[in-house]
Image: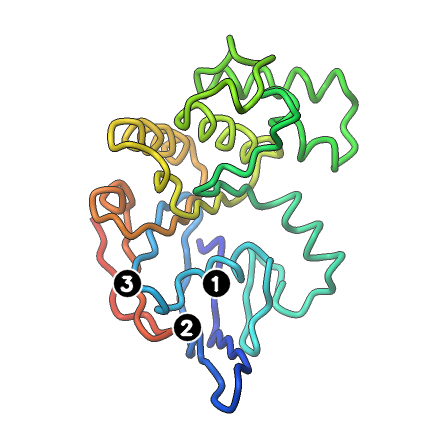
Amino acid sequence: MDLVTFKNIHKVYEMGAEPVRALDGVDIGFQKGSFWAIMGPSGSGKSTMMNILGCLDRPTFGQYFLEDKDVSKMADDDLSEIRLKYIGFIFQSFNLIPQLTVQKNIELPLYYLGWDAEKSAERAKVLAAKVGLETRLNHRPSQLSGGQMQRVAVARSLAVDPHLILADEPTGNLDSKTGDQIMELLTELNKEGTTIIMVTHEPDIAAYAHHRLHMRDGKVERIDSN
């Protein structure tokens, strides 16, 4: 069963006299519980695809179904709710709030959902332990290594038990050994049933995924599967 379905997705940006077709008729389904890597050269459309998948942007036309919901024409408030309840994000630059502790960074999505403080704290502690940071709960990002910061980002992405995790170059700011540790963590999450879609330009990182979607000029060029 597909968790995510794109039907004839186009994204056109009006830039000067010539429109730019960032996505040009993309049809694809991402199965529930699968692990995908999106690859392609600069300008291939992979970042635009991730923005639409994350409900951060809308297609110019076409339909995007997240489970049975057509999110392609939802209002901004509804898209915000979809992002908060259904999607976890992991970014190359971690996007942690420097003034907050590890625990409070992990709790942030729960704060926006209105969880009470005690329940949020307990959830954050469970997730910190899951990513091996149970002894770092009161540390701030400046006191952590790059790998530890990305582990906090992974824990935060899991806070609401999302249906989908989107990872944008999750190892881009890490050395190869630490990057492999993050990928092993994502692999374990996927084995537990979490659907993961990741953008990467590194073939060895893409090899962790079950499927590799190659983009070129806004189109799906090919799909490789394990």
Q: Position of residue 80 (x, y in %)?
A: 70, 52
Quadrant for residue 112, please give it. top right
Residue nearest the viewer, comparing 54 with 30: 54
Looking at the rendered image, the disc whose residue lies closer to the viewer, 1 or 3, is: 3
> Closer to the camera, 97 or 162?
97
Q: Earlier in the sequence, mark 1 or mark 3?
A: 1
Query: Label 2 to label 3, Cα distance in Å?
Result: 12 Å
User: Quick check: marks 2 and 3 in contact, CB under 8 Å?
Assistant: no
Q: 70 or 11, which is in the foreground?
A: 11
Q: Residues within 10 Å of mark 1 (few under 14, many from 20)?
A: many
Q: How far apart are labels 1 and 3 at the CA level?
A: 17 Å
- What percent of the width, then of the height, locates residue 128? 52, 18
Q: Amino acid at mark 3?
A: His
Instruction: Left or right? Give the position of 160 relative to 143.
Output: right
Q: For marks 1 and 2, give the one nearer the viewer.
A: 2
Q: Position of residue 131 (x, y in %)?
A: 45, 21
Residue at the extreme bottom of the image, as rendered: 17
Q: Is residue 28 left or right of residue 84?
A: left
Q: Badge 2 local density, few (<14 within 10 Å), some, or many (20+)?
A: many
Mark 1: amino acid: Thr
Marks 1/2: CA distance? Answer: 10 Å
Q: Which mark is residue 214?
A: 3
Q: Which mark is residue 77?
A: none
Report helix, strand or loop for mark 1: strand
User: Is residue 77 shown above or below 149?
Assistant: below
Q: Secondary structure at mark 2?
A: strand
Q: Which mark is residue 5?
A: 1
The residue identified by callout 2 is 26
Whichever of labels 2 and 3 marks the residue nearer the N terminus, that label is 2
